[in-house]
């Protein structure tokens, strides 16, 4: 990522919310929330997209200074799940598509809601932990039910923080395809095979100064469903119409499925 504050940007807000709510809750409640929030943190694997179809900064930064291509995907076909990213526990949680939140005030409101709700839920659970359900009034049962709905605020935050970003990057208009498999090496064998609910077996590449693990998303079966809607040629791209049309035809993508457009940016 080009932004070194990824994840940390939202985590800082969580800490600030806890500090602001500390006078309303005992330290033990705060500590229990923090233990849940920081437990079992898994590495998110992210593929970044932009809703900006023809923006100069994107061409310059991500397409060989405007010489490359941009592929427009149909988001509804590419990924059906728009829920918060979470540790993959089934087919429905394997992959999510999320709009990045750049509005710091909106992010703070959301984070405050999760944090306060989770702290209140912990407090409510402790209040009734010595009582049987049959002993409770309807009002008390409702209070417990409401607490259960907010109990996992710490877990929701781990997913939400993947979608929050420094507003300085707002011009990227980013959407993220997020995959969070239970990925770790076996203590004895060091192998990572047979990962449940992963898109593929883990693969590896060198990126700048580090080894990167990644997973492959095969969307070939979505071609006929129209997952690729547009092909954009950058402002410096010299590919001829004949060449790009021939490639699309040989690839099974005709112009009815994928519209070819040239950048309107006058950059040279």
Image (cartoon, rainbow, N blue to C red):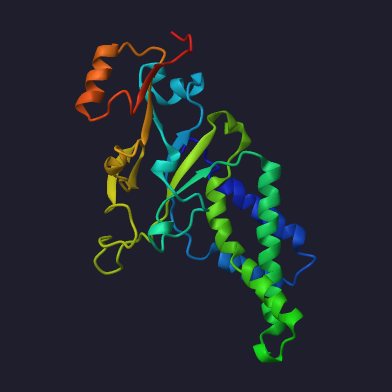
Query: Among all residues in the image, which is located at the extreme right?
Result: 23
Residue 176 appears left or right of 117: left
| Quadrant of residue 259 within the rendered picture | top left
**Spot occupied by residue 2 in the image (x, y as percentages of width and height):** 48, 35
Residue 159: x percent and y percent?
Answer: 53, 54
Q: Which residue is depicted at the point 60% across and 52% down? A: 11
- In the rendered image of this protein, does residue 246 appear above or below residue 3? above
Q: Quadrant of residue 111?
A: bottom right
For image coordinates 31% across by 68% down, the residue present is 187
- Going 56% across and 52% down the picture, which residue do you hit? 160
Q: Position of residue 229 (x, y in %)?
A: 38, 30
Left or right relative to 8: residue 78: left
Q: Position of residue 266 (x, y in %)?
A: 48, 9
Q: Quadrant of the C terminus?
A: top left
Q: Residue lying farthest front? A: 256
Q: Looking at this view, name the residue that lies furthest to the left.
A: 250
């Amino acid at each position: 990522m080009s932004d070194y504050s990824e994840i940390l940007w939202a985590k800082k807000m969580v800490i600030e919310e806890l500090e602001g709510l500390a006078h309303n809750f005992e330290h033990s409640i705060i500590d229990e929330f923090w233990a849940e929030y920081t437990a079992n943190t898994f590495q998110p694997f992210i593929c970044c997209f932009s809703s900006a179809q023809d923006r100069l900064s994107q061409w310059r930064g991500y397409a060989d200074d405007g010489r490359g291509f941009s592929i427009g995907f149909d988001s509804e076909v590419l990924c059906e799940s728009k829920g918060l990213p979470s540790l993959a526990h089934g087919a429905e949680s394997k992959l999510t598509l999320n709009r990045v939140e750049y509005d710091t005030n909106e992010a703070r409101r959301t984070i405050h809601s999760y944090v306060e709700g989770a702290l209140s839920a912990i407090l409510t659970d402790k209040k009734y932990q010595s009582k049987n359900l049959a002993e409770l009034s309807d009002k008390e049962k409702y209070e417990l039910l409401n607490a259960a709905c907010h109990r996992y605020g710490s877990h929701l935050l781990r997913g939400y923080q993947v979608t929050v970003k420094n507003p300085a990057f707002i011009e990227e208009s980013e959407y993220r395809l997020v995959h969070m498999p239970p990925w770790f090496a076996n203590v004895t064998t060091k192998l990572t095979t047979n990962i449940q609910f992963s898109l593929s077996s883990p693969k590896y590449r060198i990126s700048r100064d580090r080894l990167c693990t990644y997973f492959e998303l095969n969307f070939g079966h979505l071609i006929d469903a129209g997952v690729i809607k547009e092909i954009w040629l950058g402002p410096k791209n010299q590919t001829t119409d004949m060449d790009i049309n021939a490639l699309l035809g040989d690839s099974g993508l005709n112009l009815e499925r994928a519209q070819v457009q040239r950048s309107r940016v006058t950059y040279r």
